[in-house]
Image: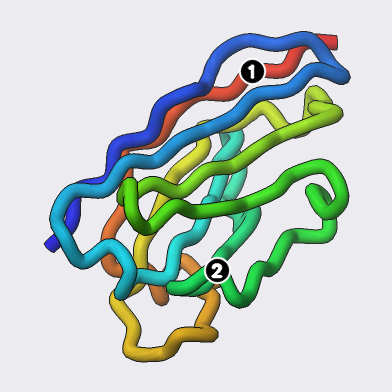
Amino acid sequence: QVQLVESGGGLVQAGGSLRLSCAASGRTFSRYAMTWFRQAPGKDREFVAAISRNSGSTYYADSVKGRFTISRDNAKNTVFLQMNSLKPEDTAVYYCAATDTASNGFVATNPYAIDYWGQGTQVTVSS
Protein backbone atom coordinates (compact mmCIF):
# COMPACT_ATOMS: atom_id res chain seq x y z
CA GLN A 1 0.00 0.00 0.00
CA VAL A 2 1.13 3.53 -0.75
CA GLN A 3 -0.23 6.95 0.16
CA LEU A 4 0.06 9.73 -2.42
CA VAL A 5 -0.14 13.43 -1.55
CA GLU A 6 -0.14 16.09 -4.25
CA SER A 7 0.94 19.69 -3.79
CA GLY A 8 1.79 22.73 -5.89
CA GLY A 9 -1.56 23.56 -7.42
CA GLY A 10 -2.93 27.07 -7.52
CA LEU A 11 -4.14 29.96 -9.64
CA VAL A 12 -2.03 31.22 -12.53
CA GLN A 13 -2.56 33.34 -15.61
CA ALA A 14 -2.45 31.89 -19.10
CA GLY A 15 1.13 31.45 -20.23
CA GLY A 16 2.39 30.88 -16.72
CA SER A 17 3.94 27.83 -15.10
CA LEU A 18 3.33 25.53 -12.17
CA ARG A 19 5.20 22.55 -10.79
CA LEU A 20 3.15 19.84 -9.14
CA SER A 21 4.67 17.38 -6.70
CA CYS A 22 3.41 14.03 -5.50
CA ALA A 23 5.00 12.57 -2.39
CA ALA A 24 4.61 8.84 -1.78
CA SER A 25 4.84 6.97 1.48
CA GLY A 26 6.80 3.79 2.02
CA ARG A 27 10.13 2.44 0.84
CA THR A 28 8.96 0.74 -2.37
CA PHE A 29 8.31 3.79 -4.55
CA SER A 30 10.63 2.47 -7.25
CA ARG A 31 8.31 -0.45 -8.00
CA TYR A 32 5.45 1.84 -9.10
CA ALA A 33 4.82 3.29 -12.50
CA MET A 34 3.49 6.82 -11.93
CA THR A 35 0.87 8.77 -13.83
CA TRP A 36 -0.78 12.18 -13.73
CA PHE A 37 -4.47 12.48 -14.62
CA ARG A 38 -6.75 15.49 -14.56
CA GLN A 39 -10.48 16.08 -14.39
CA ALA A 40 -12.29 19.28 -15.30
CA PRO A 41 -15.81 20.04 -14.02
CA GLY A 42 -18.41 18.01 -15.88
CA LYS A 43 -15.81 16.07 -17.84
CA ASP A 44 -14.24 12.62 -17.67
CA ARG A 45 -10.93 12.05 -15.99
CA GLU A 46 -8.24 12.15 -18.66
CA PHE A 47 -4.67 10.99 -18.94
CA VAL A 48 -1.96 13.67 -18.82
CA ALA A 49 1.49 12.10 -18.44
CA ALA A 50 3.12 8.87 -17.32
CA ILE A 51 6.57 7.69 -16.31
CA SER A 52 7.99 4.22 -15.85
CA ARG A 53 9.55 2.81 -12.69
CA ASN A 54 13.12 3.83 -13.44
CA SER A 55 12.32 6.91 -15.60
CA GLY A 56 13.29 4.99 -18.72
CA SER A 57 9.99 5.70 -20.46
CA THR A 58 7.65 8.68 -20.51
CA TYR A 59 4.40 9.27 -22.36
CA TYR A 60 2.24 12.37 -22.78
CA ALA A 61 -1.22 13.24 -23.95
CA ASP A 62 -1.19 15.15 -27.23
CA SER A 63 -2.85 18.11 -25.51
CA VAL A 64 0.15 18.69 -23.22
CA LYS A 65 3.04 17.40 -25.29
CA GLY A 66 5.82 19.95 -25.49
CA ARG A 67 4.44 21.95 -22.56
CA PHE A 68 4.43 19.49 -19.64
CA THR A 69 7.27 17.35 -18.33
CA ILE A 70 6.93 14.43 -15.95
CA SER A 71 9.88 13.34 -13.83
CA ARG A 72 10.58 11.38 -10.68
CA ASP A 73 13.16 11.12 -7.94
CA ASN A 74 12.99 7.62 -6.52
CA ALA A 75 15.42 8.49 -3.73
CA LYS A 76 12.92 11.10 -2.51
CA ASN A 77 9.76 9.09 -3.25
CA THR A 78 8.45 11.94 -5.37
CA VAL A 79 7.05 12.43 -8.86
CA PHE A 80 6.76 15.86 -10.48
CA LEU A 81 4.77 17.50 -13.24
CA GLN A 82 6.30 20.67 -14.64
CA MET A 83 3.60 22.61 -16.47
CA ASN A 84 4.64 25.45 -18.76
CA SER A 85 2.71 27.67 -21.18
CA LEU A 86 -0.48 26.96 -19.30
CA LYS A 87 -3.82 27.46 -21.03
CA PRO A 88 -7.31 27.97 -19.60
CA GLU A 89 -8.24 24.50 -20.86
CA ASP A 90 -5.62 23.07 -18.48
CA THR A 91 -7.87 24.05 -15.58
CA ALA A 92 -8.72 20.88 -13.66
CA VAL A 93 -8.08 18.86 -10.55
CA TYR A 94 -4.81 17.03 -11.09
CA TYR A 95 -4.40 13.55 -9.63
CA CYS A 96 -1.25 11.59 -8.95
CA ALA A 97 -1.62 7.84 -9.45
CA ALA A 98 0.48 4.72 -8.96
CA THR A 99 0.51 1.30 -10.58
CA ASP A 100 2.27 -1.62 -8.91
CA THR A 101 4.10 -3.38 -11.72
CA ALA A 102 6.97 -5.78 -12.24
CA SER A 103 7.78 -4.11 -15.57
CA ASN A 104 10.52 -1.51 -15.65
CA GLY A 105 9.24 -0.04 -18.90
CA PHE A 106 5.50 0.00 -18.27
CA VAL A 107 3.57 3.28 -18.36
CA ALA A 108 -0.06 3.46 -17.21
CA THR A 109 -2.36 5.62 -19.33
CA ASN A 110 -5.75 4.12 -18.45
CA PRO A 111 -7.44 4.87 -15.09
CA TYR A 112 -8.38 1.20 -14.75
CA ALA A 113 -4.70 0.28 -14.55
CA ILE A 114 -4.24 2.43 -11.44
CA ASP A 115 -3.83 0.85 -8.01
CA TYR A 116 -3.53 3.99 -5.86
CA TRP A 117 -4.78 7.58 -6.22
CA GLY A 118 -3.85 10.82 -4.56
CA GLN A 119 -6.49 13.26 -3.33
CA GLY A 120 -5.94 15.74 -6.14
CA THR A 121 -4.78 19.34 -6.34
CA GLN A 122 -6.62 22.17 -8.07
CA VAL A 123 -5.01 23.98 -10.98
CA THR A 124 -6.82 27.05 -12.28
CA VAL A 125 -5.59 28.98 -15.32
CA SER A 126 -7.17 32.35 -15.99
CA SER A 127 -7.23 34.11 -19.36
Would you name the residue on which mark 1 appears?
124
Q: Is residue 101 left or right of residue 53?
A: left
Q: Nearer the viewer, residue 70 or 47?
A: 70
Residue type (three-letter) at the residue carrying disc 1: Thr
Image quadrant holding the N terminus, namely bottom left
Here the colouring is rainbow
Amino acid type of the residue that numbered disc 2 sits on in the rendered structure: Ser
Residue occupied by mark 2: 55
Point 74% across, 44% down: residue: 68
Q: In the figure, 108 relative to 48: above or below?
A: below
Residue 61 position, x and y percent, is: 74, 60
Count of residue discs: 2
Measuring 45% from the left and 85% from the top, which residue is drawn there?
Answer: 104
Task: Look at 44% across and 28% down and name the residue there.
Answer: 121
| Percent of width and height locating residue 76 | 33, 46
35 or 111, which is in the foreground? 35
Residue 41 coordinates in the image, percent (x, y): 57, 31
Looking at the rendered structure, the secondary structure element under dot 2 is loop
Residue 114 in picture, x, y percent from top left: 37, 68
Q: Could you give the CA–CA distance between mark 1 and mark 2, rounded to whole angstroms?
A: 28 Å
